[in-house]
C-alpha cells in the first residue's frame, strides 16, 4: 500500500509487511533512509528494505530494483543500519559489534580490505566491536568501536583547482 501525502503533514504508514511484523510481536528499533533506499530494523534483529538496489545496496546478491516492494535482508541480529548519505553504501551493525556492508566500494570505503565494487552480498568489514559507523558519499568511512578507537578507510585526498583536502585525517595522501 502506498500512502500519498498531499498536505505535507506526518501520515502513518500502513505498509502490510511492516504491520505484519509489528502485529507478530516485533517492534521497530530504528530505521535509516536516503533518496534511494529505506531500511527498517526490528527489535528481534531482523531487517527489511526497499529501494533501487542499483549497486547491490539491499545485499541480495544482485542489482534488481525493489522500488515498490519490501524485501527481507539476510543479515541477522542487527541492531542498527547506516546508509552513507545519498550514496550507495550500506552498513549493518550486529549485536556482537560486527559490521556487514554492501554497495559501492570503489575507494575501499566499505572497509573490507579491497576496492572490488559493487559488493552485492553482505560482506563483513575488517573492523570489529563496532559501536557506530559514519560514511560520506562513497569516499571515506569512520568506525567507532566500543573501546573508543576510531578506524578510517576509503579515499583520503581530494584535490581541486583551489584546494587539497584530507578526508581521513591520518596525515597521508
Image (cartoon, helix red, strand yellow):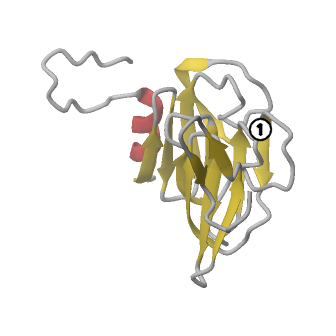
Residue drawn at (71%, 36%) of the image: 104
Q: Where 89 sits versus 142, above or below?
A: above
**For the residue carrying disc 1, how many other residues have a C-alpha within 10 Å: few (<14), some (14-19), or many (20+)?**
some
SS for callout 1? loop
47 relative position to 154: left or right: left
Residue 54, image x and y in percent?
A: 67, 22
Residue drawn at (21%, 29%) of the image: 11
Residue drawn at (67%, 63%) of the image: 152
Q: Quadrant of the N terminus?
A: top left
Q: Where 61 sits versus 5, above or below?
A: below
Of residue 50 and residue 107, the one placed in the foreground of this image is: 107
Q: Residue furthest front?
A: 162
90 relative position to 13: left or right: right
Residue drawn at (59%, 22%) of the image: 52
Of residue 117 and residue 18, the one placed in the foreground of this image is: 117
Q: Where 153 sits versus 17, above or below?
A: below
Q: Which residue is mark 1?
A: 106
Residue 56, image x and y in percent?
A: 72, 31
Residue 149, image x and y in percent?
A: 62, 79
Amino acid at each position: 500500500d502506498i500512502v500519498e501525502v498531499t498536505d505535507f503533514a506526518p501520515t502513518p504508514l500502513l505498509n502490510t509487511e511492516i504491520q505484519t511484523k509489528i502485529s507478530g510481536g516485533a517492534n521497530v528499533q530504528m530505521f535509516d533512509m536516503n533518496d534511494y533506499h529505506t531500511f527498517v530494523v526490528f527489535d528481534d534483529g531482523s531487517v527489511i528494505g526497499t529501494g533501487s538496489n542499483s549497486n547491490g545496496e539491499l545485499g541480495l546478491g544482485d542489482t534488481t530494483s525493489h522500488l515498490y516492494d519490501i524485501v527481507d535482508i539476510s543479515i541477522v541480529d542487527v541492531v542498527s543500519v547506516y546508509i552513507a548519505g545519498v550514496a550507495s553504501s550500506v552498513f549493518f551493525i550486529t549485536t556482537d559489534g560486527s559490521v556487514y556492508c554492501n554497495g559501492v566500494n570503489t575507494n575501499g570505503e566499505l572497509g573490507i580490505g579491497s576496492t572490488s565494487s559493487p559488493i552485492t552480498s553482505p560482506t563483513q568489514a575488517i573492523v570489529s566491536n563496532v559501536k557506530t559507523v559514519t560514511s560520506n558519499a562513497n569516499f571515506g568511512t569512520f568506525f567507532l568501536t566500543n573501546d573508543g578507537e576510531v578506524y578510517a578507510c576509503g579515499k583520503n585526498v581530494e584535490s581541486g583547482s583551489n584546494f587539497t583536502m584530507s578526508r581521513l585525517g591520518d596525515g597521508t595522501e
